Amino acid sequence: MKVENTKAQMRKGVLEYCILSLLSAEEMYPSDVIAKLKDAKLIVVEGTLYPLLTRLKDSGYLAYRWEESRSGPPRKYYKLTPVGRKFLKELDDTWDELSQAVKKATRNNPS
């Protein structure tokens, strides 16, 4: 198994959490989400992001609104719903527990 496959799976595993966290701070247009994820070294393309946004919206965690654009078609801006905020809080707690467990499990692992 190649390390790149494992790294990609690890990134995919935290992507929804990162998207919800970004959208908890402010509503965003999908290309803004992609730019912020790229800045964080979580490379994402539109073909990955849009299905995730749709799934999160269909689950009730996100809502969107349309805004007219001066340079093209209307834009869809996403934001967290109250249900999404509650879900994100649960993910925050889970992430804290998981990261502590991983640190504990790997701390004494000689590399």
Image (tube, rainbow, N blue to C red):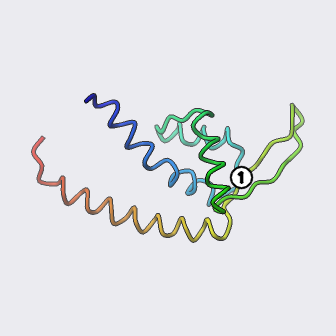
Callout 1 environment at 10 Å: few (<14), some (14 to 19), or many (20+)?
many
- Quarter location, residue 93: bottom left
The residue at 68%/42% (across/down) is 30
Residue that badge 1 annotates = 78
Q: Position of residue 24 (x, y in %)?
A: 62, 60
Q: Position of residue 45 (x, y in %)?
A: 58, 32
Q: How many marks?
A: 1
- Quarter location, residue 70: top right
In this rendered view, identify the residue nearer to me: 47 or 97.
Answer: 47
Residue 17 is left or right of residue 65, and the answer is: left
Three-letter amino acid code at disc 1?
Tyr
Q: Position of residue 57 (x, y in %)?
A: 67, 55
Residue 107 is left or right of residue 50, and the answer is: left
**Vertical placement of residue 16 versus 48, above or below:** below
Q: Secondary structure at mark 1?
A: strand
Identify the image quadrant of the C terminus. Answer: top left
Residue 87 is left or right of residue 93, and the answer is: right
**Vertical placement of residue 90 versus 26, above or below:** below
The residue at 66%/48% (across/down) is 54
The residue at 59%/46% (across/down) is 52
Q: Position of residue 83 (x, y in %)?
A: 63, 69
Identify the image quadrant of the N terminus. Answer: top left
